[in-house]
Structures are given as structure tokens and as C-alpha cells.
Amino acid sequence: MEKAKTALSQFVNGTIGGMMIGIGGCVYLSCDNKYIGSALFSLGLFTIIQFGYGLYTGKIGYLPLRPPKYGLECLFTLLGNAFGTLIDAFLLNFTRIAPAISEKAAASVETKIGDSLGSAAILAVFCGILMFTAVENARMSNESGGHVEKTVGTILCIMVFILCGFNHCIADMFYIFVSGTFPKAAIYLLVVILGNSVGGMLFPLLKMLTDKPFGKQ
């Protein structure tokens, strides 16, 4: 019973996190200026960090540092993220802004799935690195009381991944759902999830080879 309650909590927190990323995706699609849009998108990750919601790309990097059961937390968070972005997409499709954001999302998805899987994976790895960096920066900033550093670090990591064209699996879920392109984007999405996971774990694994691994600075 306790395990079921824990799994439900992780799923619900993931759902809220997915909804916040969907809102971030919505504002990005609504902005003509990509720099402003990328900055506003960071609201999604900022609220996830600030309120303790769940985000797969923010959690998976810690997998090498946690007990094996932590893998289930990442899985339930991912499922919740997917459900949260689906809720956003479903509801937004009943609104007056649906045609505009759906069109932009569809164009973005077509570009992404038209890419080679190798390229998509590499771009996802870089995004995973940035997501771990944002979350770890927030953790360290909370410990030191550096609230400005937490906010600036979150915004910068989000802006860089968007402006560089890196692939983020949860944001892409929202774009795919809101544009109705899921079936043909399924393989692409699996590749990006894998790439984000590798990218998220890369620096923690490399830091294990140093005299100051994460968590022991």
C-alpha cells in the first residue's frame, strides 16, 4: 500500500511537471521572438524546481548516485510528464489559440522527425547535460542560499537548449500531442528519451572519476 502511494505521488508530481512544461511550450510557440520565447519557457522548469514537481530530465541524471529503486521514481515521473503534456494539449485544442500553436508545433515536429536518429540522439544528449546542470545548480544554490544564481542558472540552461535546437523529450511530447503527430513521431521520441537520459547521467558519471564527485563538493 505504501509503495502504491509513493508511486502515485511520483506520478502526480510528474503530471504537474508535465503540465508546466506544456505551458512553457505554449508560451514559446506564442512568441514571435525566439529569445523572449525561450526565456519565458523557463517558467516551466523554474516552477518545477521551486515547488518540487517532477521532471524526468531533471531526475534521471541522479540515477547513478541513488539506490536502484530510484529508477522506478524516474519511470513514474516520465509517465506523469507524458500525461501532463497530454492534458495540456487536449485542453488547448478547445481554445482559440489552438490553430496557431498547433501549426507552429507541427512545423517543429516535422523538422525534428525529418532529422536522422543519430543527430536527434546527439542533440538530446546535449539537452540532458543542460537539464542536469540546471537542477544541480538549483540544488547547490538552495544549500548556499544563492537564489539569484538558481534563477539565472535555470533561465540560461533553458534558453541555451532552445536556441541551440537541442531536443527535450517532455517539451517534444507537448509539441507532438498538440500537433497531433504522435504516431509518426513515436520512434523519434524514444530516441530523445534515451539521449536525454544519457546526457543527464554523463557528467555525474564522469565526476565519479574525479576527487570531487557530485554531492561531495
Image (tube, rainbow, N blue to C red):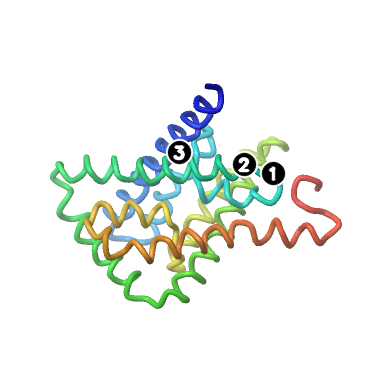
Q: Residues within 10 Å of mark 3 (few under 14, many from 20)?
A: many
CA distance for labels 3 and 2? 14 Å
Q: Eyeballing the image, is 201 above or below 120?
A: above
Based on the displayed image, in which of its 4 quarters is residue 186 positioned? bottom left
Which of the two discs, 1 and 3, labels the residue nearer the N terminus?
A: 3
**Residue 4 placed where, x, y %?**
50, 27
For disc 2, the marked residue is 70
Q: Residues within 10 Å of mark 1 (few under 14, many from 20)?
A: few
* Residue at the (62%, 43%) spot, across then down: 138
CA distance for labels 1 and 3? 19 Å
For disc 1, the marked residue is 66
Dot 3 lies on which element?
helix
Mark 2: amino acid: Tyr
**Mark 1 and mark 2 in contact (Cβ < 8 Å)?**
yes
Mark 3: amino acid: Gly
Based on the displayed image, in which of its 4 quarters is residue 79 positioned? top left
**Residue 77 placed where, x, y %?**
48, 41
Q: Eyeballing the image, is 211 above or below 216?
A: below
Dot 2 lies on which element?
helix
Dot 1 lies on which element?
loop
| Labels in figure, total | 3
* Residue at the (86%, 57%) spot, across then down: 211
Mark 1: amino acid: Arg
Residue placed furthest toward the top = 1
Q: Which numbered disc covers residue 14?
A: 3
CA distance for labels 2 and 1? 6 Å
Is residue 217 left or right of 64 when viewed as pictured? right
- Give the number of the mark in front: 1 or 3: 1
**Residue 213 placed where, x, y %?**
79, 53
Is residue 163 left or right of 52 when viewed as pictured? left
